[in-house]
Amino acid sequence: MSGLLIVSDIYGFPHDRRDLGSLARRPTVHHRLADLSGQPDLSGEALHAHLFKGDGIGIAARALARAGHAGLCGVGFSAGGTALWQAIAGGLRLRALVCVSSTRLRREAAPLAIPTFILWGEADPHRPDQEWNRYVPLEAKIYAGQHHDFYRSALTDGTSPLSEDIERFLSRFETTPALQDAERRKGFSA
């Protein structure tokens, strides 16, 4: 079972292992996005402004790339997923990446060189369009009727469809042949 590199949203969710539902069975390394961005006292909209109006997201991505969590599977929530995506683009070598409600990814134009699974709430007005979902991630799933922060309640329920979907995706990349097959299907090189 691969370990997880978890990066929080702008409010610090998930706060600890109890917030991870069934994913807490896996070994985890947890980073608060505020800490990674160099502004540990910021939260919410103030952190969002630092991340996207300044270079906070770049600082966070570079901190993740330097941290050396190679071989783990990344799971990022909202802006945390964006930081992980940029860290991977900058050289962080993870096995796979799951981004939940990471709407800033709509600005990314090319797939990463690892398997990616992106999950959105249907009612999130900032999620990318279907064309983006078909081209950029390996897989995408939209949860009917859900808003941007649906993951906060959905994940803490250990039997939630969100937890099950993340587990199902990650389990496909536990072995090297599955990982190599997924990379070949997306045109990635080893």
Image: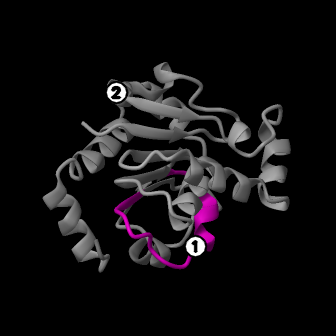
The amino acid type of the residue labelled 2 equals Ser
In depth, the one of 86 and 118 nearer the eye is: 86
Q: How many marks?
A: 2
What x and y, as percent, mark residue 170?
A: 29, 47
Please tell me whether mark 2 sits on a helix, a strand or a loop: helix
Please give the residue where the numbered disc 2 appears in the rendered image: 22
Q: Residue at x 28, y 50 (%)?
A: 169
Q: Earlier in the sequence, mark 2 or mark 1?
A: 2
Q: Residue furthest top?
A: 18
Q: From where the camera sits, is residue 171 visible?
A: yes
Q: Quadrant of residue 95?
A: bottom left
Circle 1: residue type: Glu
Give the residue displayed 42% in from the left and 57% down from the top: 93
| Above/below status of 10 relative to 13 | below
Q: Which residue is mark 1?
A: 108
Residue 143, given in percent of the width and then of the height, sits at 44, 50
**Image quarter hosting the C terminus:** bottom left
Please give the name of the residue rendered at 14% of the width and 60% of the height, measured from the top-left corner.
Answer: 177
Residue 101 belongs to the span the image colors magenta: yes
Provide residue 144's location: percent of width, then percent of height: 45, 51
Magenta range is 100-117
Q: 28 or 9, which is in the foreground?
A: 28
